[in-house]
Amino acid sequence: MSGVVAAVAVGKTLMPVLGDAFKSKALASMIDRVSSKLEYHILFRHRITKRVRSACDFSFPCSPYRKWLKSLAQADYSKPIEQVSVQLALKLDEAFGAKSAEWRNLSDHLSRALRLVEQTFPALAAELPDKEYRQLTEQWAQQRSVSVREQLLKQSGPDAALSAADLSAVLLRSSDARRSVRLRAFNLEAADLNTYFQGIKIPDVPVGELRILTGDFGSGKSEMAEAWYRSSARTLASVHDSAVPVWLSAKDLGNRPLEQVINAQIGTKWRHGRGVDLVVDGLDETDPASAQAALDHARALVRSFDNVRVLMTARPGVIEPNFGEKLPVSLLSTEEAGDLVVLAGAAKGTTFGWSKALRASITRPFFALAAGRALSRDRAPHGEADLIRAVVEDALHQGSELASVGSDVIYTVLKRLAVLLTDGISGTNLSFKNRQTALSSRLVTPFGRNRLAFSLPIFQQWFAAQAMLEGDAPIEKVVGGATGFSHWRWAAAIAIIDLSEQDTERLDGFIAQWVTSNPGVASWILIRAFGKAGSWNGPNDAPLDPVTSGPRLLKALRTWSGALGAWAGCVLPQQVISGPMELGITVDGRQLIFGFSKRTVSHDTIVDWPKDLNPFHVDSTSKWQFWFSRTAPPNAAWPWLVIQDLIAKASEKSLKNEPYLGGSNGIWGEERRYAIALSLTGHHGSLMRPTISANDIRTTAIGLRDRIGPHGIVKVNSTQIFADELDDIVRRLDDSSTAELPSPVPVPDAVQSMKSGWVWDLFTEEGLKKFEVEVYARACVAYDEALANAFSAFAWSMPGTVLQPMGVILGLSYVDGFADRTPCLSVVRVPMDLITELAPTDPSTVWAKSGRAVIHREVDDRRNDFSQRGRDYFEHIRQWLARKNIEPANLPGWSETIEGSISKERPSVAIAVGWLDEDLKSLGLVDGIIHNVQ
């Protein structure tokens, strides 16, 4: 068996070395030096024969061999060494066959003849004093060449009498070649993917039966069949008279019977009991009639001959397997897919956070390799939509898939199907003719009665994008509401990548329309198409056009500011919000400097930033105010990305500092006023949450207001308070005629029995449950208030809104942490439609007064249990949304955290800000981490 291993190894790695080290002319030189002895010295020929006999584990006719030795001097050594060896082996085999019927009857006599040729040269070299010749020939003898055996098989025909080991080596080499062709598109070698190949599960095909591997395009059918073939080839080398593996491509069969094609490959001996392990790959790559004919021939083959197994591959819907014949391809797990993406060249952890559609796609090995290849390029895709586009277009350049975009008829039907499916309409709306046209591509799969689906979601997204670009689908679909955004967002992102490379004017038109309709949707699309506006530039990036850059940047700024509504005042400079402005802009390569003139103008004006004014050292007396300097992203959408990035950076600060994002009359105003009252009366930072005297608040507020005036600001105990806030709190106290201002949330109930300095010991367990459930119920209201106020212009694009009206399910447990009993909260946001169904029902359950939150006591240290329940909650919510035909961009998940609300002066607002932060991050409209809400 070591000879077989060596043969395989040589075929891939050692033959190039040996080809350099042992040229035919070196062999000819050696023969020349011993030619006279070969021709005239019988004892020399006897010594060589003896050496060769001792090196072989089989006998052979010595007289014909010695006669053959004499002929070596006349051989043609100008040919490659492999061809010389083949010719000598054929001649020796013929000589033995002429003298010995026993030799002719050997099943592997040709392999034996070649083995004798290979042993002859070391035997000759051993007679020479030249050490170099001995080393070269010994090395050659030790490393048996698969290519020689291939040549021998070709010249001798399919019935060549090769040994099982030699035939196995040749078949494995042909398998290596097929794999190499399949991997060529990814610029990979089989050795790069050894881990993946070793993990492929070999299909189980019983003797005398047929199986059909079924799977969509790219699912790894051919590689699974290849693994089965290779297993059979290795068995051939180790098990006497085992079946011979044969690989056939369905498109090359024509209408020939399978047994005829098998005979042409391996001869006829398989028909007499030895059998065959047959692979017929790609039934879906031929026409339906030919595919059915091949299947019928295969069924007849397993019934007609002994020891026959057949494995065929096809995508679903091409042929109808009988019961028991279908063998579905197992897709990769999420972890396996991620590993394969990395093997193909991507960085570790790349797939984390990818969309559901893209993660589903890479469970097909072809697309995992395509994604890894795309990400390994010098100029890798910048956003997920760019990656989807690269993977799909790479796939559509492959063989028969090219016909899907090369044929106007098929392309038009696939676009139409993509629009229907993206709109949520089944493929049954296509005519019978168009359904058949769609199925003629390998990109579509039938299911149910007359229903069609793309084999991968990313194909649907790509064709829907083409429909958008070509006017077959209105671009307003993606901003038409939560359902439209859910369905069309990826198609829109792919579409603007195409536009960014073709038509800047249309690109600006698409983005402007989306920003105007819903800036949250537009931001999501931009981030997925181009990534964030970081400095990605390389030395070959084209400089910006100094003539058009200013107007495009102004258009982007004005469109964003007009669309953001109330949020614009929180994240953009006052000059942008207040009216017309004079902009100073400098464009240097791809570097931008941007600022405002303090001069009053009647309409927006663009001028050059003063050349003699350093933008980073502008004093207060200057007529100019610097805003930003940065490098433009390397794509045509850069003006929109630059402004979006500035908004995202400002959003982090505003979320943290703006006290009235939800208005002044609800939870936001109530908690803000209580925080002000605590500071005014010397209770700032108090965990007791005392009830405060209205007179004390009023007296201090009026005194401060008189001191700072109507537009002043005062800082009291670390709380910054505005004059109008002092007026507001006094007015509200007067209007209500209340004598006290109570805490808006439940107060501690265990002050007298504190066991430690930890804040949670201010509460009994029951008191803590009441506190948390009310705080979270109020947070749900605060979230609603912010959406209706600061974010009303784009509220429906915020991921959390798919749950509205929203409630919270809480679990309280105690874990070993900072103290012996550290309270831990599990938090799950759910639609109010589901809260009663999903809420716990054990006796420890406590509901908020509003019904928007519920809490119960959980088992301590049960985190694995919570993770499973969290997934169960998530699945219920996903199904609920599916019934509403919505797939959110980022569905709020579940969390587990150490209790942190007790020490917050505005606990409900702090939680709502965290939820808003998650939403805005998902849309690409906030950048940064919020540590403490001020």
Image: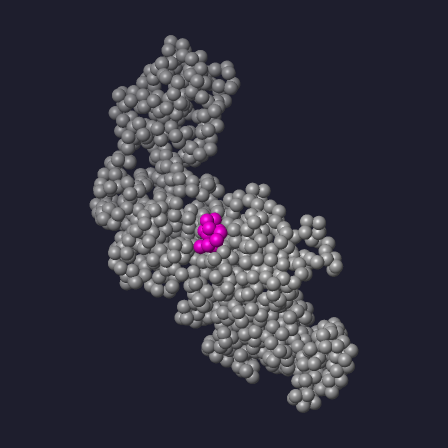
Viewer-nearest residue: 595 or 477:
595
Could you say where residue 87 lies in the image, as x and y percent from the top left? 34, 22
Res 149 visible: yes
Viewer-nearest residue: 301 or 419:
419
Q: Residue at x 31, y 58 (%)?
A: 446
Could you say where residue 399 lies in the image, as x and y percent from the top left? 35, 44
Q: Residue at x 34, y 46 (%)?
A: 406
Q: Compared with residue 535, is residue 855 higher up or lower down, i.e. above or below?
A: below
Could you say where residue 412 lies in the image, as x and y percent from the top left? 33, 53
Viewer-nearest residue: 925 or 21:
925
Q: Residue at x 74, y 60 (%)?
A: 620
Looking at the rendered image, the quarter that the C terminus falls into is bottom right
Res 748 visible: no
Magenta stretch holds residue 31: no
- Magenta span: 495-507
Q: Main secondary structure of the magenta part?
A: helix
